[in-house]
Image: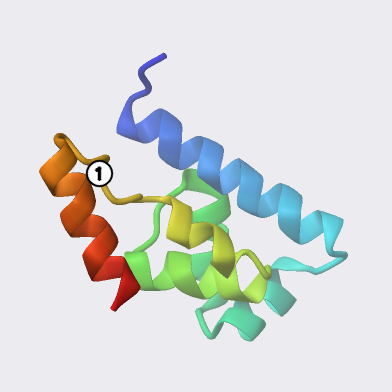
């Protein structure tokens, strides 16, 4: 299913809020821990609006930074030559 940027951002804000609450943190605590302003945190949760830096800070504060690696996985090899080349690079 395809989503609009607004739908994705809003859903991300909802997940940030749910994770924060599950960790028993207030918005003010989370903002402080992330090193962002309270207003920025509220906007991130409420509207899904944040800079990449703010999103990374939120992920670290909520102990989700490992999940950021999965956002943009490397593309799959399109040929056997490309696969072998990728394997050689990975072994270095």
Asked if 76 appears above or below 42 in the picture, the reply is: above
Instruction: From the viewer's perspective, tell me whether residue 61 is left or right of residue 29.
Output: left
The residue at the point 62 percent across, 42 percent down is 14
Asked if 27 appears above or below 22 in the picture, the reply is: below
Q: In terms of depth relative to the viewer, which is nearer, 88 or 52?
A: 88
Instruction: From the viewer's perspective, tell me whether residue 25 is left or right of residue 38.
Output: right
The residue at the point 68 percent across, 70 percent down is 63
The residue at the point 39 percent across, 60 percent down is 50
Asked if 70 appears above or below 91 in the picture, the reply is: above
Instruction: From the viewer's perspective, tell me whether residue 45 is left or right of residue 86.
Output: right
Q: In terms of depth relative to the viewer, which is nearer, 11 or 81?
A: 81
Give the image quarter of residue 80. top left
Residue 1 in percent (x, y) is at 42, 14
Give the image quarter of residue 85. bottom left
Quarter of the figure with the C terminus: bottom left
Residue 73 in percent (x, y) is at 35, 50
Instruction: From the viewer's perspective, tell me whether residue 60 is left or right of residue 48.
Output: right
The residue tagged 1 is: 75
Local secondary structure at mark 1: loop
Asked if 92 appears above or below 23 in the picture, the reply is: below
Residue 36 in percent (x, y) is at 50, 79
Residue 22 in percent (x, y) is at 84, 55
């Amino acid at each position: 299913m395809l989503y609009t940027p607004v739908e994705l951002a809003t859903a991300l804000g909802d997940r940030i809020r749910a994770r924060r609450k599950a960790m028993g943190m207030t918005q003010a605590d989370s903002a402080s821990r992330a090193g962002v302003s309270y207003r920025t945190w509220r906007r991130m949760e409420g509207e899904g609006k944040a800079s990449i830096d703010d999103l990374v800070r939120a992920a670290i504060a909520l102990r989700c930074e490992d999940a950021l690696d999965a956002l943009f996985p490397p593309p799959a090899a399109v040929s056997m030559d490309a696969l072998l080349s990728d394997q050689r690079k990975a072994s270095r």
